[in-house]
Amino acid sequence: MLNKLLQKLMGDRQSRELRDFYPLRDKINEVFETLSSKSDEELRTRIQEIKQEILSVIQPLEEEYNETMNIFQTEANESKKESLRNQLDAQKKNLKKMNQEILDFHLVEVYAIIKDTCRRLLGQTFQVRGNEVTWDMVPFDVQLVGGIALHMGIITEMATGEGKTLVATLPLFLNALTGRGVHLVTVNDYLALRDSEWMSPIFNFHGMEVGCITTGLDFEQRKKAYSKDVTYGMNSEFGFDYLRDNMAVSPQQLVQRDFYYAIVDEVDSILIDEARTPLIISGTVAQDKNFFLEVKPHIAKLVHIQGQMVSGILAEIRQMMNEGDTDSINLGKALLKV
């Protein structure tokens, strides 16, 4: 009875978490209302300023981490390596913390700019899978909340028709401002291609490039797609590219960049249902040839010579045994047993 009363008064955990995002949602809408007077160029310029502010915080920490990593990789003394390992862990944690803080700081303004970008795109037509589509989307409050949750690393469940595809552009855009590249993982080639083409106007408006990983791409096409600011793709293709990269023998053979931020669409299907079937890959065989016919005569000759030699030795031992040579008798018995 008490639990029911408390739940009625305070709500369940999910409701409480959503309520925590409402102040951010309201701030986004407040900033959004001030942006209509700005020109397209002013909006683009402000995004570039935010990007530089983010990089000014992150890049020095990344350079410090990379410098320590280079020293660690060349250090031979195990005691010093252990100290460097602890230093790397601390630097990595600090980099992650500062990265989260600077992105959180700019979240409200960036989300408001993306919402206003969608407003500016209204009525424009774009090609999506060969069809002409008119842009008619501006994020609703529920979509803003969903975008906040995704940025915070929370699994977000939205009903069909609530615009999950548009929601994903908010955290993708924000995290892409770090310049590291972000991924959206979906369940099939069609969705990857459709969503990448459908949502690309938002990113293209601000000079960001969108790539797509699908079945049938060659090495150069894959590498180019991964180099984009935002990369959509099918889950198994991301997985196989990861396996292939781990089999590479030089950095030039890698297609993927370092992993930073990803959104997994249909997460229950991809990480639970499909994860039960492992991805398996094997390397190519350099030369597939059967050498049996070439080797057989040499082996047969060797076996024949060995047989003749053993037969000769045993014949000599038998002759000595017949002549009563005691030492030869003991040696002959031992050889015959073998």
Image: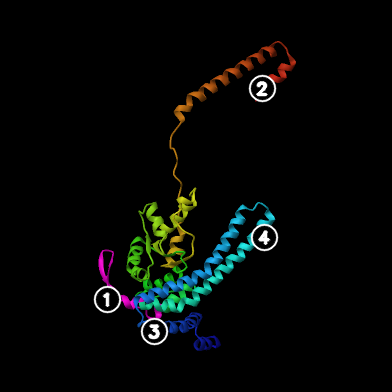
Q: Looking at the image, is mark 3 or mark 2 nearer the viewer?
A: 3
> Between disc 1 and disc 4, whose residue precedes?
4
Q: Label 1, on which residue? A: 123
Mark 1 and mark 3: Cα distance apart in space: 21 Å
Q: Label 2, on which residue? A: 335
Question: Residue 323: x and y, percent?
Answer: 71, 10
Q: Which type of secondary structure does the marked residue at label 4 adopt?
A: helix
Residue 180 vertical position relative to residue 246 in the rendered view, above or below: below
> Between disc 3 and disc 2, whose residue precedes?
3
Residue 125 in the magenta stretch? The answer is: yes
Mark 4 and mark 3: Cα distance apart in space: 51 Å
> Between disc 1 and disc 2, whose residue precedes?
1
Q: Which of the 4 image quadrants contains residue 73? A: bottom right
User: Do the CB atoms of the residues marked 1 and 4 lie less than 8 Å apart?
Assistant: no
Mark 3 and mark 2: Cα distance apart in space: 102 Å
Q: Which type of secondary structure does the marked residue at label 3 adopt?
A: loop
Q: Label 3, on which residue? A: 34
- How packed mark 4 is, by other alpha carbons closer than 10 Å (few <14, some 14-19, many 20 or more), is few
Q: Residue furthest right?
A: 326
Q: Quadrant of the C terminus?
A: top right
- How packed mark 3 is, by other alpha carbons closer than 10 Å (few <14, some 14-19, many 20 or more), is few
Q: Residue at x 52, y 68 (%)?
A: 58
Q: Amino acid at mark 2?
A: Leu
